[in-house]
Image (cartoon, grey):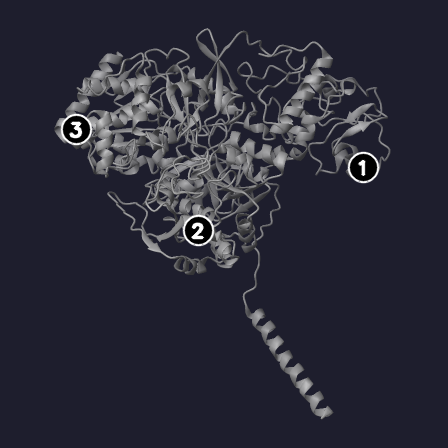
């Protein structure tokens, strides 16, 4: 009787195995579900991507009180740039000469904040995803020059002269490559006071502010022959 | 302008107050400048600010135009306008500059021996009237036609309809809104029996999830999109971009889902399948307020002349509908659409979640579609099955592209089958219109004649001899353009064009009339949320320019209809509007009185008992509801909205080995319509100087094409060379290209296809097959 019980138990287990195996085999026969996921090696639309970055902080920016005593000016902003659009040099000493920057720089420059030592707000980088900071940004170890230079430094665009109509939104007078994220320079306590936006919460900056220096491709064809009588 | 704040402390205080206000309440328009920021700003002096709706898109932003010494010199957003709450987009802010282009048409021009000769307005109008008389007597009343636009003001469209349908007695009245809104109209009519959205922009402030169906809102409806972004900052709403191409909107959205062209039909059905399969149907809503129908399938694409189609709706039951949806499981649809089953379920889960309010938004992506009516129906299905409709935040919302596509073309009814109230095929409607128009009812032809594409085909064939084109630029916008341009240039055709600048359309004109533009005259526009907005005449028209309304009135008088066109020149806009209002009397469509429109930034019809109606079909808000229930879809005789069984059908021309790419066309944020206005605004032209063809970056690399290279596009209609744009404003998928249509020097419509939705007759500019080669 006991033996019969053991045998029947094994039979049940065996049948159960066959049943389960059959189910899993059948399931295996079904076409596999492969989600359609695209991979892209290319940064999509670099000129568009950045605009909306940091927008999650837009309301904080709007609510931040202005720290009158520690504001940067546009003059200071341009001071450590060789020309308008050049990568700024590092105006403070850097401890670790061997490092390429990486999260060391980002500690202060990803989101900014007040630095007691320099009595200033750390500027926010518009491109935190590029972490080899020091391939472009170098410290200035001396104030003397090897030889004097005749480099013709052009004047940077001025504030307040880029409106087409009184009160209309100023156009963007600078190139935006590498600084597609408007809020990083135009909002927050480290923004130069002349160009600090009064309405960071609007987020979609380029619905009102458009570039004034779009490169034109003149391909020379398809110029509409207008009726000369009208012209 | 703003006075500078000398006291620093008070400045900081004001900044803090303002920030608090912006964050807490609403987008506040006043922008304060710090002393150093406004140092170089031009001082505005004492401008006289007057309110108007914006000239450009269908959002209908309220703007304040600064007038100085009789010239429009500045624009700011109207803080009182509930539409834009003081914000504009770059086009709006610079809109007044489009009045002052150097080549503004200021005198009528008549073509004599191939040359345009300046003439007086009186002579030009005499000539038009005599030519019309001559054409009617020689070829019949159906040989004359008028082609207007969603940029017509309400009075423009009204007098056009009255003259042609009521007096002359031809239904040859069409407008370019056929090319942009017709599918939305037929979508509304088939699903609800009444045109235009049930909801309004206030839905944006209430919804939790926004699904954008093929709608690059960040560029095309930027001010509304900024309201979405604003809500995301304040309430953490979700924005889902469901599109065929990666755009600025995709960048801003929380999630971007890409589908293959035309397969939105399948995905919408799959969402409905998921809703039913998961038991997310709002059963009591569906039982009380919905019925099920199916129509004819395999309708064709209208590619042949004189194509006609009439749908035969057939009632079905819920079980039949459920069986039909078995073909649209997410896994099956994944294979057609390229959208993963996971993403389809993700989309469906928002619609299905009873605790989430969902707003669906769309515009040309769904309307310019050879199954445009169907896809409109299908999105309504989703909202009807879940009962997410006609309540604040639950809203299928069809956006428009022109300032008065709704106000004029849809409400006044400047389409071949329409009357201001109802349709020409209905005898009661004809009688009603004839009485107000003071014409014999027999005058109104009960048979619709030509829709837009067919109207130009008729011009080509010679069935139409005379066409008057106002405020639009069909020689840039017609699909398969070359055929219709050649048609206009044929012998024995007489074309009158009323416009403000020389365009490719004035090129084919026999008479060019200079029009008074926007704030150079008085008028009204109606925007996407049923809001009618009035603007006064703020500046004098350029040269001899005359409003489109008065041009038509003058010609009507010359044709002998003085009795019907009794209007006084000084007060005609008011007289016309008051006459027009009579057509819409009643709780379902009453229009606000002119005094109301003058005193506030617009009013939303139905305007009943001194109140705008924000949500139609909902008894809480809509006084026309009369069935005692919470909802009443009174557009249909049984008071029920229709859930339509509409299958997926492929596009008429799909890529093959000869033409392996999809071609999609569209707009950019800087330019509006054909750019005839925006390209004359220096700021906008400098930002976007010419058209281009966008390629997929990886594919461009394979083809060795870089930005600026010449690329030749060839379709079965012809070829065109454009500079390439790789990874700039937008990114199409592999084997797809995108071209904006604003550039009159690179007429992409020369190569597009004139297939249209058989129900709405609206062409599909978004899909045809093209070959792409580096030149």
Host chain of mark 1: A
Residue found 39% across the figure and 59% down from its top: B320
Q: Nearer the viewer, mark 3 or mark 1?
A: 3
> In this picture, is A96 found above or below B522?
below
Residue pointed to by mark 3: B440
Residue B210 placement (x, y as % from top left): 54, 41
* Figure check: B333 above or below B169: below
Which element type, helix, strand or loop, lies under badge 3? loop
Dot 3 falls on which chain?
B
Alpha carbons under labels 3 and 2: distance apart: 45 Å
Q: Residue at x 73, y 91 (%)?
A: A2
| Earlier sequence position, callout 3 versus callout 2 | 2
Residue occupied by mark 2: B286
From where the camera sits, is residue B194 visible? yes
Q: State the separation of the CA atoms marked 3 and 1.
A: 85 Å
Residue at numbered disc 1: A104
């Amino acid at each position: 009787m006991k033996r019969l019980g053991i045998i029947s138990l094994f039979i049940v287990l065996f049948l159960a195995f066959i049943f389960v195996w059959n189910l899993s085999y059948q399931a295996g026969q079904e076409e596999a579900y492969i989600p359609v996921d695209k991979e892209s090696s290319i940064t999509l639309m670099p000129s568009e991507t950045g605009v909306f970055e940091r927008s999650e902080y837009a309301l904080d920016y709007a609510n931040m009180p202005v720290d009158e005593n520690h504001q940067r000016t546009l003059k200071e902003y341009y001071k450590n740039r060789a020309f308008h659009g050049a990568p700024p040099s590092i105006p403070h000493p850097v401890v670790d000469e061997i490092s390429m920057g990486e999260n060391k720089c980002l500690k202060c420059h990803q989101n900014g904040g007040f630095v007691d030592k320099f009595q200033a707000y750390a500027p926010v980088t518009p491109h935190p995803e590029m972490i080899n900071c020091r391939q472009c940004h170098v410290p200035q170890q001396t104030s003397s020059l090897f030889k004097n230079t005749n480099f013709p430094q052009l004047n940077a665009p001025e504030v307040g002269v880029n409106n087409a109509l009184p009160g209309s939104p100023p156009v963007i007078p600078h190139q935006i490559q590498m600084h597609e994220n408007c809020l990083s320079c135009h909002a927050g306590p480290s923004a130069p006071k002349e160009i600090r936006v009064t309405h960071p919460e609007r987020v979609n900056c380029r619905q009102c502010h458009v570039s004034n220096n779009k490169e034109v491709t003149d391909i020379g064809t398809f110029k509409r022959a207008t009726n000369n009588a009208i012209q | 302008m703003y006075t500078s704040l000398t006291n620093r402390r008070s400045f900081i205080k004001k900044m803090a107050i303002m920030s608090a206000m912006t964050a807490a309440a609403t987008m506040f328009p006043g922008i304060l400048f710090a002393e150093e920021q406004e140092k170089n700003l031009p001082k505005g002096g004492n401008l006289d600010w007057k309110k108007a709706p914006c000239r450009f898109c269908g959002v209908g932003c309220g703007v304040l135009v600064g007038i100085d010494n009789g010239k429009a010199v500045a624009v700011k957003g109207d803080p009182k306008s509930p539409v834009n709450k003081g914000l504009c987009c770059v086009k709006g802010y610079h809109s007044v500059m489009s009045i002052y282009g150097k080549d503004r048409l200021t005198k009528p021009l008549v073509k004599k021996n191939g040359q345009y000769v300046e003439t007086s307005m009186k002579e030009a109008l005499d000539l038009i009237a005599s030519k019309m008389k001559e054409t009617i007597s020689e070829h019949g009343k159906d040989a004359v036609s008028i082609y207007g636009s969603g940029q017509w003001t309400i009075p423009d469209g009204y007098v056009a309809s009255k003259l042609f349908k009521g007096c002359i007695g031809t239904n040859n009245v069409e407008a370019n809104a056929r090319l942009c809104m017709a599918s939305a109209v037929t979508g509304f009519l088939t699903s609800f029996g009444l045109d235009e959205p049930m909801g309004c922009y206030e839905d944006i402030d209430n919804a939790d999830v926004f699904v954008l169906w093929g709608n690059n809102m960040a560029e095309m409806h930027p001010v509304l999109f900024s309201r979405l972004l604003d809500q995301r900052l304040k309430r953490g709403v979700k924005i889902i971009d469901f599109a065929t191409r990666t755009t600025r909107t995709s960048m801003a959205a929380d999630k971007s889902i890409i589908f293959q062209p035309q397969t939105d039909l399948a995905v919408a059905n799959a969402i409905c399948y998921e809703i039913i399969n998961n038991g997310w149907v709002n059963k009591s809503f569906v039982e009380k307020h919905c019925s099920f129908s199916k129509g004819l399938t395999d309708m064709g694409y209208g590619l042949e002349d004189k194509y006609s189609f009439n749908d035969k709706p057939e009632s079905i039951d819920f079980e039949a509908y459920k069986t039909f949806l078995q073909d649209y499981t997410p896994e099956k649809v994944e294979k057609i659409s390229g959208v993963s089953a996971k993403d389809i379920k993700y989309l469906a889960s928002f619609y299905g979640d009873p605790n989430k309010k969902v707003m669906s938004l769309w515009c040309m992506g769904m309307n310019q579609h050879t199954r445009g009516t169907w896809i409109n129906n299908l999105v309504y299905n989703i909202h009807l099955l879940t009962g997410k409709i006609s309540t604040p935040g639950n809203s299928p919302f069809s956006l428009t592209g022109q300032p008065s596509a709704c106000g004029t073309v849809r409400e006044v009814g400047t389409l071949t089958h329409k009357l201001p109230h109802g349709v020409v095929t209905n005898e009661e409607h004809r009688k009603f219109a004839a009485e107000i128009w003071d014409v014999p009812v027999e005058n109104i032809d009960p048979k619709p004649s030509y829709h837009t594409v067919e109207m130009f085909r008729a011009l080509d064939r010679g069935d139409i001899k005379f066409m008057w084109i106002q405020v639009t630029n069909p020689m840039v916008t017609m699909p398969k353009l070359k055929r219709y341009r050649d048609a206009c240039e044929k012998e024995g055709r007489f074309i009158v064009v009323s416009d403000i600048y020389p365009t490719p359309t004035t090129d084919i004109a026999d008479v060019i009339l200079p029009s008074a533009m926007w704030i150079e005259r008085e008028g009204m526009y109606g925007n996407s949320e049923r809001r009618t907005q009035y603007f006064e005449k703020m500046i004098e028209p350029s040269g001899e320019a005359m409003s489109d309304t008065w041009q038509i009135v003058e010609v009507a008088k010359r044709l002998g209809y003085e009795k019907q066109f009794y209007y006084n020149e000084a007060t005609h806009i008011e007289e016309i509007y008051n006459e027009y209002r009579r057509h819409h009397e009643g709780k379902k469509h009453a229009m606000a009185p002119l005094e109301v429109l003058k005193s506030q930034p617009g009013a939303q019809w139905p305007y009943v008992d001194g109140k705008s109606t924000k949500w139609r079909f909902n008894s809480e808000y809509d006084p026309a509801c009369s069935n005692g229930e919470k909802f009443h879809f009174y557009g249909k005789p049984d008071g029920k909205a229709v859930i339509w069984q509409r299958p997926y059908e492929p596009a008429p021309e799909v890529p093959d080995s000869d033409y392996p790419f999809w071609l999609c066309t569209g707009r950019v944020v800087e330019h509006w319509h054909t750019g005839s206005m925006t390209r004359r605004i220096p700021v906008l032209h400098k930002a976007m100087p010419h058209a281009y063809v966008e390629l997929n970056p990886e594919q461009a690399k394979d083809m060795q094409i870089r930005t600026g290279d010449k690329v030749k596009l060839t379709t079965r209609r012809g070829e065109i060379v454009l500079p390439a744009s790789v990874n700039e404003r937008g990114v199409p998928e592999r084997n797809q290209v995108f071209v904006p249509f604003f550039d009159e020097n690179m007429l992409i419509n020369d190569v597009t296809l004139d297939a249209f939705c058989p129900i709405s007759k609206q062409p599909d500019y978004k899909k045809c097959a093209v070959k792409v080669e580096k030149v």
